[in-house]
Image (tube, helix red, strand yellow):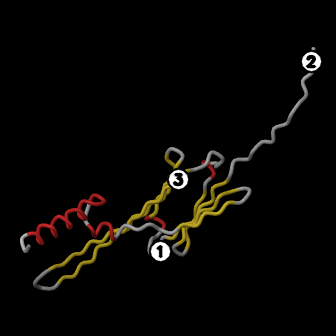
Amino acid sequence: MRGVAPTFGQLFNEMFDNFNGGTLRGIANTSMPSVNIAESETLFTIELTAPGFVKDEISISVEDDHLVISGEKKTENQESTKKYTRKEFTRQNFQRSFYLPEGVAQESISARFENGILSLDLPKKKVEEKTGRKIQLQ
């Protein structure tokens, strides 16, 4: 039974190392930010939490009718003494994607970032009221 335990442990570790294309540490540094979505008559509003990020670390794009919000933060800590140098790199990232309904005016989407909260306004397209008309028979 002793020979089985190390093999099982190795298999278990490899399973997690291959999950998400990297290591378990990569999973721990990837997060899914919380989101609030609201709708009014004229627009959709999305609020996304991104504490610890700054504006330059966040990217927003529209790709094939999807709103894609992502963030990436890289830091490097270095500690040096006469005998050794130790560097630690950390990386935090996230990505959220939202399907945009047909009625969203994609060219008018606006965003602002304040106190770790990303707020997006997605205006709805103005719907032209269809007017009816009577057709005369000839």
Q: Amino acid at mark 1?
A: Pro
Q: Amino acid at mark 2?
A: Leu
Distance (Cα) linking label 2 and label 1: 67 Å
The structure residue drawn at horizontal position 27% and vertical position 71%, both measured from the top left corner, is 89
Q: Which residue in the rendered view is the most extreme toward the front?
A: 1
Q: Nearer the viewer, residue 110 or 31?
A: 31
Nearer the camera: disc 2 or disc 1:
2
Left/right of residue 65 with respect to residue 7 in the rendered view? right
Residue 67's tag is: 3
- Is the residue 68 above or below the residue 37 in the image? above
- Is the residue 23 above or below the residue 132 in the image? below
- In the picture of the structure, the residue carrying the numbered disc 1 is 51
The structure residue drawn at horizontal position 61% and vertical position 48%, both measured from the top left corner, is 101
> Mark 1 falls on what kind of element?
loop
Distance (Cα) linking label 3 and label 2: 49 Å
- In the picture of the structure, the residue carrying the numbered disc 2 is 137
Q: Amino acid at mark 3?
A: Leu
Left/right of residue 24 with respect to residue 132 in the rendered view? left
User: Callout 3 environment at 10 Å: few (<14), some (14 to 19), or many (20+)?
Assistant: some
- Is the residue 128 above or below the residue 3 in the image? above
User: Callout 1 environment at 10 Å: few (<14), some (14 to 19), or many (20+)?
Assistant: few
